[in-house]
Image (cartoon, grey):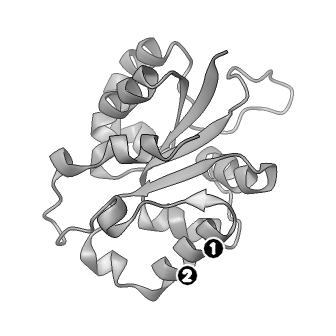
Amino acid sequence: MTRTLYFVACAAPPARRLPIGIRAAQKAGWDVCLVLTPSAHRWNADAIEDLRDLTGHPVRHAYKHPDEPDVLPAPDAILVAPATFNALNKWVPGISDTLALGLVTEAIGLELPLVALPYLNRAQAAHPALDQSVRFLRDNGGTVPLGDEGCVPHEPKHGNLDAYPWQTALNTLP
């Protein structure tokens, strides 16, 4: 039986290396459906066809019209990677102003396995809203690999894309 993973990517530098995470998820047995935030979609505009070919599914980034059929199979789990400071903090009040946020806010109510792998700098990680958001997500069934267990915040303007722990996030999925 194939398991479907919605791979949601926000606009952070690792979003330019999505094939790494997609291939790792596929190797783990997931049928990957890619959903991008509008900004991540702009960042990957030249690669959308390649990403579609890699996943075998259309790459979604905006809500569909209510009369249009779903083009993606239903998810068995959702991975948000990279998860930005902005996205993490919009989940707590349930803001779903993009398709990506709509899917992850709904995942909590649907009790879908949800993993959010942040990409943050130390200044963002020091903001008090982050602790509240991470605690909320964890208290509501989400997994947020942060710190020694996942994403280690970097110095502002000095992120190391080679250190982004794609596999760590995938290892936390059921």
Residue 60 pos. (x, y %): 57, 31
Q: In this view, does 16 lie to the left or right of 157?
A: right
Q: In this view, does 52 lie to the left or right of 67?
A: left
Q: What element carries label 1?
A: helix
Which residue is painted at 13% across and 64% down in the image? Answer: 158
- Note whether 170 is above or below 73 in the view shown: below
Residue 96 occupies quadrant: bottom right
Q: Is mark 2 on a helix, strand or loop?
A: helix
- Please identify the quadrant where the C terminus is shown: top right
* Classed neighbour count for the residue bearing mark 1: other residues with Cα under 10 Å, few (<14), some (14–19), many (≥20): some
Q: Which mark is residue 136?
A: 1
Q: Which amino acid does label 1 sit on?
A: Phe
Residue 148 occupies quadrant: bottom left
Q: Which mark is residue 132?
A: 2
Residue 123 pos. (x, y %): 28, 80
- Note whether 124 is above or below 50 in the view shown: below
